[in-house]
Image (spheres, coloured by chain):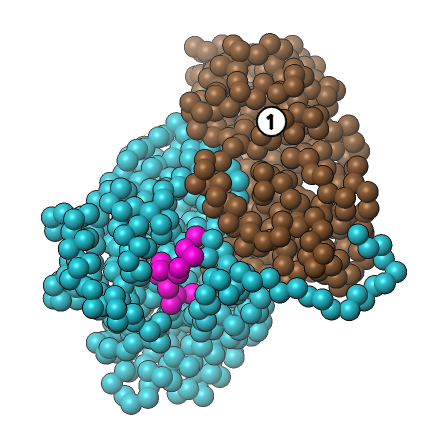
Chain colours: A brown, B cyan
């Protein structure tokens, strides 16, 4: 962190005073949880930082109500540990990108996880971080405290500002208290694996599986270069994997049905079914996918693309035609592509953007040098009408541009 | 609807007489944009639009416009913005909170001609539809290939997908499969100034701020939805329903808690109290036990081995919680019969009472029996009968307050009773509305749940979309502030309380 003065308020009242001071003096401030995602997003040039890590602690946890409230600076790891002790979890699988940035694991806060709306492989079944935020309290760039939502799932009282603040990167409010939905951990989990499929055949298989009623909670394809970096396998082929979770009889039944679907597919497409992963191997595998761990060994620019699932291979192909030495894997049944490119000043931006343009979707630059992130658009550019609307929304919360100015887009 | 004629007008923003005076001129201009039969001005033809499903409140609109294309909507809105004419969007008019209630000086923008499914993409598991397509038609259109659209509000045969987006509709299956907001992937929306925006698509997550999430449940105050992309799901292989009777609602409530805390998320978990059981049994003969105080319907879906396994576990939890009746559906026909009573509950209560209000608060599940007892006390105080149906799994209550509008003062008493029930929901940690929306019905209760600063910030969001507040004004917010006034920055110069901390 290069900013000069870091304020770390110990109480919510102190935080309010500090934000109000910044507003009164029109001082732009960077808002961070523990700073674990400082190197993501557009770089900011503020001289002051407010860090929320001292505002930590679970305020309410009622397992039978499937709800937890915590101060925004509470480490995600602490929350996950607490709910795990009651057989529950944050079903959106908040990723831990620490190692991707060459940093330690488990530093991230719940405020950061929500502010960046990052979700793991279970996104396809359980929804994104934003789908699990029931309510929050925050301080706006007007220095006013406001809240939205509540502690119940079914709630349509007023605008759903929980959606707006999820993925807003701290640009519309400093969250102080966050209420999340928690869900039970399934009784058992099994990961069905096919090896040796090419990208196209793999996504076709995943599509067939996602069209079946097997209710999978993870659908990933690792081309062989990436699969070779997995600590779960010792393998030179590609890995296509699907996760099923539920009561034991259900998991057994569904693994059998997946086997039937894959056998039929592999007869023409090649590929081979191997023994399913259970227990700790399965857990480790999905943690690797969630955290994009395959890209921790280099510092090359890393993109995260979201596209219609079936066009995933086509998008990857068109990028491979234009850029050398790319590496990638598919999550979300083909809909999310993690893409590592050679380190160039623009990180292959024009190629990535034009590949997206043809099919719809978006591409965000997750990891790149500060110079690159200043040069290219880190987030998918918005069309002019949407940009102006986003800008007006930002202004409605933060008219002076005090909170995380320019973190997402110029002026936002 | 069972509610009788009886015109009542809600306290709405004062009609702009200058706009009303220009009515003929506005009709001509709108006919230029929407030719043919798309502009309705004749009083008799306007009559069907004077209320939505909250029929206690009525108002004849100035004009009704039924455009056919996004371009027409864009031009209608741009014209209305220029001429300062208010606009109320309307799907099928099934809102239970008055979300589509007309304004005397505003046009109704009806989406009924936007009734086509544009594309079914089985590979990416999405349906792209125009907003006037009914909720059920989306499921029906993909049923042949074994898919369905999960949110299933009770009015699904009539309500439109555009209206579902505006209200963030739920249904009995949202406990497991989520509300509209969790099943929506993309939108095309026209803003009040006529500009068209597109968000999301066949991919996951939004670009920029999550406007997809913000617009869902915004009750037609931010923009007019002209295209919707939803995700469809493969149908579960099997589903079975369990009918559970309990000698007290406390025991039923603890059974609900027991199921959830054991790690089971049923596809649906519905509860009815004794008056609701008796009303529905007399109406549809679903075979409900009449000697119980509370009835639960628990539906489990998935592959057969999973369903059978979970049925046994739920039965055990029910027995442990003192269930006096346990019946499991053994055929699809029987499953539907179990549901038939619940689905007809509102109509059944409607048979018993000349009029009723359907309330819609949500509470933390553990407050269920407490809230039931307090509601019964209120029922005695207000001298009005009450029947209760709940989405018990997610704590969403639908108390039905029965009254007779022809009795002097009863309507007002019922309204007050309803307000007290919703205040009670907030008091115990819940919210004013779980799925029906604020609309005009709960507008004046918003201050029970939100501070002035909360509501001002929400209205500033409205200003970002509609700075002159012409789109569905008078709904959702108890007080209307001008955007210029809301935009002012109030600097909190107060004393610095922490002189020892580093200052910027």
**Which residue corresponds to the image point at 56% horizontal and 69% vertical from the top-left?**
B452
Instruction: Residue A38: name its quadrant.
Output: top right
**Which residue corresponds to the image point at 72% horizontal and 39% vertical from the top-left?**
A45
From the viewer's perspective, tell me whether residue A103 is left or right of residue B142.
right
Q: Which residues are magenta?
A: B465-477
Q: Is residue A294 above or below residue A142?
A: above
Along the line of sight, the residue nearer the viewer: B166 or B279: B166
Along the line of sight, the residue nearer the viewer: A222 or B501: B501
Q: Is residue A220 above or below residue B403?
A: above
Along the line of sight, the residue nearer the viewer: B76 or B205: B76
**Which residue corresponds to the image point at 38% horizontal and 70% vertical from the top-left?**
B441
Q: Position of residue B68 (x, y in %)?
A: 21, 44
Q: Position of residue B344 (x, y in %)?
A: 30, 63
- Residue picked out by circle 1: A376
Along the line of sight, the residue nearer the viewer: B127 or A376: A376
What is the number of callouts on the image?
1
In which quadrant of the rendered image does the N terminus of chain A lie?
A: top right
Q: As drawn, which residue projects farthest toward the right?
A: B500
Q: Is residue A344 above or below residue B194?
A: above
Question: Would you say residue B476 sits in the magenta stretch?
Answer: yes
Under tag 1, what secondary structure? loop
Q: Position of residue A112 (x, y in %)?
A: 68, 44
Decide if residue B186 is in sight here.
no
Question: Would you say residue B196 sits in the magenta stretch?
Answer: no
From the viewer's perspective, tell me whether residue B249 is left or right of residue A77.
left
């Amino acid at each position: 962190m290069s900013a000069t003065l870091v304020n770390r308020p110990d109480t919510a009242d102190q935080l309010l005073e500090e934000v109000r001071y910044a507003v009164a003096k029109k001082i732009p401030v960077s808002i961070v949880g523990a700073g674990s995602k400082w190197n993501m997003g557009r770089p900011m040039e503020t001289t002051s930082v407010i860090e929320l890590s001292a505002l930590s602690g679970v305020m309410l946890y009622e397992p039978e109500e499937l709800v937890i409230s915590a101060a925004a600076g509470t480490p995600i790891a602490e929350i996950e540990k607490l709910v795990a002790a009651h057989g529950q979890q944050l079903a959106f699988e908040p990723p831990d990108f620490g190692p991707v940035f060459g940093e330690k694991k488990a530093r991230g806060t719940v405020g950061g996880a929500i502010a960046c709306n990052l979700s793991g492989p279970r996104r396809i079944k359980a929804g994104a971080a934003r789908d699990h935020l029931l309510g929050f309290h925050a301080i706006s760039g007007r220095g006013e405290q406001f809240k939205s939502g509540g502690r119940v799932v079914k709630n349509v009282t007023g605008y759903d500002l929980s959606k707006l603040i999820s993925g807003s990167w701290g640009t519309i409010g400093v969250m102080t208290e966050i209420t999340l939905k928690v869900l039970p951990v399934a009784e058992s989990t099994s990961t069905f694996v096919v090896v040796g499929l090419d990208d196209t055949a793999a996504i076709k298989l995943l599509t067939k599986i996602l069209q079946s009623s097997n209710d999978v909670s993870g659908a990933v394809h690792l081309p062989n270069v990436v699969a070779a970096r997995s600590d779960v396998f010792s393998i030179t082929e590609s890995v296509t994997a699907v996760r099923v979770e539920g009561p034991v009889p259900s998991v057994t039944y569904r693994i059998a049905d997946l086997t039937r679907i894959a056998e039929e597919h592999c007869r023409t497409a090649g590929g081979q079914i191997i023994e399913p992963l259970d227990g700790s191997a399965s857990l480790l595998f999905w943690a690797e996918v969630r955290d994009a761990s395959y890209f921790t060994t280099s510092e090359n620019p890393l993109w995260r693309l979201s596209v219609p699932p079936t066009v995933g291979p086509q998008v990857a192909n068109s990028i491979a035609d234009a850029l050398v030495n790319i590496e990638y894997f598919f999550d979300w049944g083909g809909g999310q592509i993690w893409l590592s490119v050679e380190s160039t000043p623009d990180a292959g931006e024009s190629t990535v953007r034009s590949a997206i343009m043809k099919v719809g979707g978006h591409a965000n630059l997750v990891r790149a040098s500060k110079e690159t992130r200043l040069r290219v658009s880190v987030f998918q550019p918005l069309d002019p009408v949407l940009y102006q609307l986003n800008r007006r929304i930002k202004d409605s919360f933060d008219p002076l541009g005090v909170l995380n100015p320019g973190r997402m887009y110029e002026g936002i | 609807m069972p509610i009788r004629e009886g015109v009542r007008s809600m306290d709405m923003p004062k009609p702009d007489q200058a706009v009303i005076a220009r009515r003929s001129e506005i009709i001509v201009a709108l006919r230029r944009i929407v030719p043919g039969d798309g502009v309705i001005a004749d009083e008799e033809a306007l009559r069907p639009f004077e209320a939505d499903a909250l029929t206690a409140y009525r108002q004849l609109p100035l004009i009704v416009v039924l455009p056919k294309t996004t371009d027409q909507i864009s031009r209608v809105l741009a014209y209305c913005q220029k001429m300062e004419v208010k606009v109320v969007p309307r799907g099928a008019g099934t809102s239970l909170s008055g979300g589509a209630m007309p304004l005397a000086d505003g046009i109704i923008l009806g989406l009924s001609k936007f009734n086509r499914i544009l594309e079914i993409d089985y590979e990416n598991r999405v349906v792209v539809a125009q907003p006037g397509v009914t909720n059920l038609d989306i499921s029906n259109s993909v049923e042949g290939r074994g898919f369905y659209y999960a949110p299933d509000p009770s009015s699904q045969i009539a309500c439109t997908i555009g209206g579902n987006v505006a209200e963030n509709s739920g249904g009995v299956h949202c406990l497991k499969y989520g509300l509209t907001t969790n099943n929506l992937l993309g939108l095309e929306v026209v803003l009040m100034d006529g500009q068209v925006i597109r968000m999301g698509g066949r991919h996951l997550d939004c670009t920029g701020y999550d406007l997809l999430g913000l617009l869902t449940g915004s009750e037609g105050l931010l923009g007019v939805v002209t295209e919707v992309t939803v995700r469809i799901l493969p149908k579960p292989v099997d589903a079975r329903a369990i009918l559970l009777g309990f000698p007290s609602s406390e025991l039923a409530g603890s059974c609900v808690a027991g199921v959830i805390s054991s790690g089971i998320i049923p596809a649906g978990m519905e509860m009815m109290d004794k008056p609701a059981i008796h009303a529905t049994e007399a109406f549809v003969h679903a075979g409900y036990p009449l000697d119980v105080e509370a009835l639960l319907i628990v539906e489990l879906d998935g592959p057969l081995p999973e369903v059978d396994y979970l049925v046994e576990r739920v039965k055990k939890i029910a027995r442990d919680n003192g269930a006096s009746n346990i019946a499991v559906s053994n055929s699809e026909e029987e499953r539907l019969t179990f549901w038939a009573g619940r689905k007809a509950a509102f109509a059944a209560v409607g048979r018993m009472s000349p009029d009723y209000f359907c309330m819609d608060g949500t509470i933390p599940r553990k407050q269920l029996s407490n809230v039931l007892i307090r509601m019964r006390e209120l029922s005695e105080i207000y001298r009005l009968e009450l029947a209760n149906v709940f989405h018990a799994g997610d704590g969403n209550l639908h108390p039905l307050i029965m009254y007779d509008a022809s009795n002097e003062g009863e309507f007002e008493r019922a309204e007050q009773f309803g307000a007290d029930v919703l205040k009670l929901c907030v008091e115990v940690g819940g919210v004013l509305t779980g799925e029906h929306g604020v609309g005009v019905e709960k507008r004046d209760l918003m201050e029970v749940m939100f501070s002035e600063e909360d509501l001002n910030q929400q209205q500033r969001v409205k200003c970002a979309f509609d700075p002159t507040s012409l789109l569905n004004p008078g709904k959702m917010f108890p007080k209307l502030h001008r955007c210029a006034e809301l935009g002012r920055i109030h600097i909190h110069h107060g004393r610095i309380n922490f002189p020892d901390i580093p200052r910027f």
